[in-house]
């Protein structure tokens, strides 16, 4: 379901699929793919994805560490 829904660019599905890739649940771990899906979902306004994206930027998961972006997405998520 998550893959099919993510293909339709549904933000919640993209977020869930990002988690699957991040933790290797049902698929091979892929931090870059997880980051890309989280970014897409966050950009569409999904708060949980914004929080995940903030963590990715803060810890360099799937991308380079970027404190500015980490703080921006944390603020957008209401953290």
Image (tube, rainbow, N blue to C red):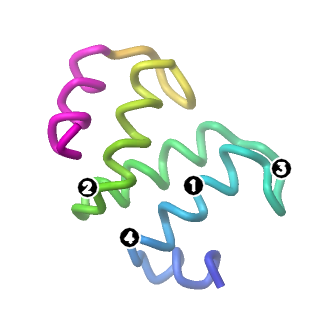
Residue labelled with disc 3: 28
Relative horizontal placement of residue 75, taking residue 3 as reference (left or right): left
Spatial CA distance of label 3 from label 1 is 12 Å
Question: 44 or 54: which is nearer to us?
Answer: 54
The residue at which mark 4 appears reads as: 11
Q: Secondary structure under badge 2?
A: helix
Please determine whether, in this image, residue 62 is positioned above or below residue 13.
above
What residue is rendered at 21% in x and 18% in y? 68
CA neighbours of label 1 inside 10 A, class few (<14), some (14 to 19), many (20+):
many
Number of numbered markers? 4
Where does the magenta region start and end?
67-79
> What residue does disc 2 label?
43
Report how far apart the C-alphas of labels 4 and 2 lie in the structure. 9 Å
Quarter of the figure with the C terminus: top left
Residue carrying label 1? 18
Confirm or deny contact between disc 4 and disc 3 (CB under 8 A): no
Give the alpha-carbon distance from disc 4 to disc 3, as whole Å.
21 Å
- Looking at the rendered structure, the secondary structure element under dot 4 is helix
Rounded to the nearest whole Å, what is the CA distance between mark 4 and mark 1? 10 Å
Task: Please say if the residues under marks 3 and 1 sit with CB atoms less than 8 Å apart.
Answer: no
């Amino acid at each position: 379901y998550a893959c099919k829904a993510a293909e339709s660019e549904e933000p919640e599905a993209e977020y869930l699929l990002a988690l699957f890739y991040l933790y290797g649940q049902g698929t091979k771990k892929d931090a870059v793919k997880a980051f890309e899906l989280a970014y897409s979902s966050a950009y569409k306004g999904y708060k949980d994805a914004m929080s995940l994206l903030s963590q990715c930027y803060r810890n360099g998961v799937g991308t380079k560490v970027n404190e500015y972006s980490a703080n921006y997405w944390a603020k957008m998520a209401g953290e």
